[in-house]
Amino acid sequence: MKKSLLVLSGVLAISAALAGCGNKAEKPAADSGAAGGTKAPVTIKVQGWYTEAQGNWNATVDAYNKTHPNVKVVYESMSEKGDSQEGMKKLDLLAASGEQMDVVMYSSASDFAQRVGAGILEPLDDYLKKDNIVVKDEYKLDPIVNGKYYALPGKMIEWFVLLNKDKLDEAKLPVPTEWTWDQYAEYAKKLTKGEGASKAYGSYFHNWKDYALLGLNNDMENPYLVKSDGTQNIDNPKVRYSLDLRNKMENVDKTSVPYFEVVSQKMAYRDVFYGGKTAMLATGNWMVGELSLNAKFKTVFAPYPKFDAKDPNGLTEVGADFMGVAANSKNKQAAYDFVKWYTTEGIQTQGLFFSAWKKADVEKNVDAILKSGKPEQVAMIDKQSLLATLKVNKATKLVVPPTYALQQEKEYLTQVELFLTGKQDLEKTIQTAKTKIEDIRKSNAK
C-alpha cells in the first residue's frame, strides 16, 4: 500500500475486520436488492455533500423509488454547507467506522483516485459486462483506473466564463465567442473600475489548482499538473504562462483580485461575482443551476479562453462527480443499479446539472435546469450565449491521476502561493514545484 494511504487504509482494514466478525449472521442478506428480487425492500443510502437546495435529491430518489419497489433509496448529505471537501472527509470517517455505505460520490478525479487506492470503492467491471455497457461508448468521460472501473460519471463539469452584461455594455465590449487568455486579460483591464474598497475588478481567480493551470486546462492531451504515471508536467510551457499571466493581472496590472485578498478574506467566488466585485468569472457549468436560483443581474457566457489563437475553440477542462458503489455495501447490485440509472436518466430527472451521458440532449438539459429555477432569476440568464458556448465546448482528456495526486496538488499550490504573494520568483516556483512533485512520486513508487 502506498505511503500516502497507510493511515486511512490501516483504519479501513481494522474496521473491516471488526465488521466482518460482528456481522457474519447478516451475510445471507447480501445483494438482496437485486432487480427482480422477491425479498422485502432494502434500503440503499446515497451519500454526498450536496444540500437538498443544491441537489434536489429527495425528488430524484423518490422518482427512482416509484419504479423500483424492491428498493428504498435514501439520500444523506454529509455537509450542511454543501461543502464537497467536508463531505468527503465525513465519507472517509464512515468508511473507517464500518457504517452503512452504498452509493458514494467524489467531486474530483484526484479525490476519487485516492479513495480507489484506499479500497473504499467496489470494482464495477462485472456489473457493466453483465449489462453490456462499454463506458467509453456510453459516456463522454472515461474514468478508468488501472484498467478497472470503480465509478461512473455523474454530473459532468465543463468550464466557461460568466460575464456581467451590464459591465460589458458600460465598457462597450461585445460578448466573446472565441478568445485567448491574452484577450481575456485585455477585457479585464477595460472592465476594472474604481479604487480602494469600492474597486470592481475585471477578473477573479479562486485558490483552487484549476486557477493555477489556466493555460494548461484546455490542453487536449494532458491538462493536469502531472502525467498519468505521476511524473511532473510542470515543464509544460503552458504552466509557466499561466502563473505569469496571473502575476501580471493581479500584481502588475491590478485587474484581477489579488491572491492575498482571496485567501486572507476567505472569499467565496459566488459572492464575489454576485456582489459585482468582478465582471468575469471562469468557472464550471454547475453555476447555471445556481444562477437560476440566485442571479442578481444579466449574465452572459463565453467559451473558456484559449492558450493560442490557433487552438480549437471551446476546449475546456472537464470533470465530474464520480459515483460508485461502496466496497462494504451489503447490497452492491441494488447500489450499482441506482448508479447506472442516475448517471443516465436520473440527472435529467434531477434537473440541476449537466449530464455526461452521450444520449442526453444539451438543449433539453438546459431547459430542465432553467425550469427548476426561479422565474425572476432565470430571466437574467442569457440562454442564447449559454447554448452557443455549450455547443462549441469540447472536453479535454480526463486525467485520473495516481492515488497520491492530492499531495502533489498541495505542494504545487504551496509554491504558487509563495509566487503570487511575492515571496519567490517564477523560476524558483517552477523548479521547486518540479522537485516536490517528483519527490512525492518517488516516495510512493513501490
Image (cartoon, helix red, strand yellow):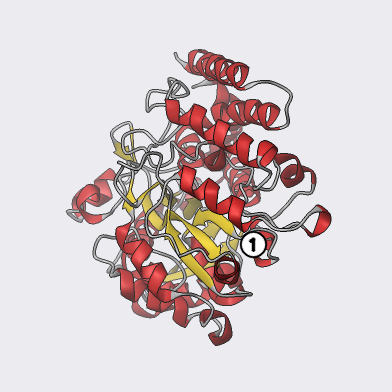
Image quadrant assignment for residue 383? bottom left
Residue at x-position 30% and y-position 63%: 391
Residue 217: image location, x then y, percent: 43, 40
Q: Is residue 254 above or below residue 338?
A: above
Image coords of residue 319 (percent x, y): 43, 49
166, above or below 20, in the image: below
**Residue 184 vs residue 172, the one in the foreground:** 172
- Residue that protrudes farthest toward the bottom in the picture: 375
- Front-lying residue, 203 or 334: 203
Which amino acid, by three-letter code, is at mark 1? Phe
Tell me where residue 224 appears, x and y as whole percent.
44, 34
- Mark 1 — residue? 273
Quarter of the figure with the C terminus: top left
322 w.r.t. 431: above or below: below
Helix, strand or loop at label 1? It is helix
Residue nearest the viewer, comparing 251 with 101: 251
Residue 362 spot, x, y in % from top left? 31, 69
Compared across the picture, whether 174 is left or right of 376 comes to: left
Dot 1 crowding, Cα within 10 Å, few <14, some 14–19, many 20+: many
Q: Is residue 56 above or below residue 48?
A: below
Q: Residue furthest left?
A: 132
Q: Judge whether residue 80 can be spotted in this image.
A: no
Residue at horizontal 39 percent and vertical 26 percent from the top: 227
Residue 307 falls left or right of residue 313: right
Name the residue located 68 percent from the left edge and 65 percent from the top edge.
276
